[in-house]
Image (cartoon, rainbow, N blue to C red):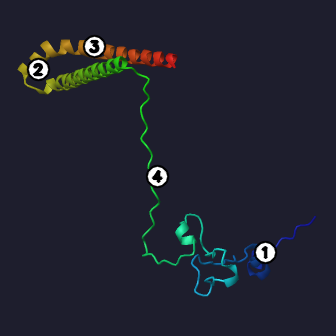
Amino acid sequence: MALPIYTPSYLANTVYHRHSLFPKPKFSIKSKKPTVDADPTPDPTSSSKKAVVPGQGFGSSPSQSSGSNKKKPKGKRERASIIRRSPVEKPAFLTKEEEAKAEEQRKNESAFLLAWLGLGGIILVQGIVLAASGFLPEEWDKFFVKYLYPSFTPTVILFLAGTVAYGVLKYLENEKLKDQK
């Protein structure tokens, strides 16, 4: 089998080659709006059938497709009907005592978290003061090294231990709730 080899000038100048590999695309443009000539005229024999308006597609409202010729201002849209549903009620599986107990637990938990946030703030301030103590006057530096430095490590250990205990407690509560279901 022989393959003919053409020179580039022959390929570039060949009309057949250019049009067979790269044919011109054929486009057709259709308007969604009907023209004045294309308006359907009502036929007296087909009065039971609805008039079909061309160009109605996805998202067109029923009032537009019913054949009414109401002119709307440009940019105004018809508002869809709103369906109101009754609100979802909470299930009544908790008794009053269980509800009071859960409310008290929420209050205790939020107080604990607030205290832990305060302890975290104290640790942050202590860390900044200890880091800046070298730039402060000599008397302040001695005071911070004598009182603040020895209490910093136990405060951080207390914070970490409390955080771990809280995490384990919440994990065990979650596991207990999973077992009840």
* Residue at position x 52%, y 20% in the image: 181
Residue 25 lies left or right of residue 106; in this view the side is: right
Question: Distance between the Cα atoms at labels 4 and 2?
Answer: 70 Å
Disc 3 and disc 2 in contact, CB within 8 angstroms: no
| Residue 149, quarter of picture | top left
- Of circles 4 and 2, the one toward us is 4
Res 141 label: 2
Instruction: Name the secondary structure under disc 2.
Output: helix
- Marks 3 and 2, the one that precedes in the sequence: 2
Instruction: Name the secondary structure under disc 4.
Output: loop
Res 158 label: 3
Question: Distance between the Cα atoms at labels 3 and 2?
Answer: 25 Å
Tell me which amino acid carries mark 1.
Thr
Question: Dot 4 surroundings within 10 Å: few (below 14), some, or many (20 or more)?
Answer: few
- Marks 1 and 3, the one that precedes in the sequence: 1
Tell me which amino acid carries mark 4.
Ile
| Residue 119, quarter of picture | top left
- Marks 4 and 2, the one that precedes in the sequence: 4
Question: Dot 2 surroundings within 10 Å: few (below 14), some, or many (20 or more)?
Answer: some
Question: Distance between the Cα atoms at labels 1 and 4?
Answer: 73 Å
Q: Looking at the image, which is closer to me, 126 or 130? A: 126
Question: Distance between the Cα atoms at labels 1 and 2?
Answer: 89 Å
Q: Is residue 94 above or below residue 18?
A: above
Q: Quadrant of the N terminus?
A: bottom right
Q: Looking at the image, which is closer to me, 130 or 106? A: 106
Question: Dot 3 surroundings within 10 Å: few (below 14), some, or many (20 or more)?
Answer: few
* Residue at position x 20%, y 26% in the image: 128
Instruction: Name the secondary structure under disc 1.
Output: loop
* Residue at position x 28%, y 17% in the image: 159
Residue 124 lies left or right of residue 139; in this view the side is: right
Residue at which label 4 appears = 83
- Marks 1 and 4, the one that precedes in the sequence: 1
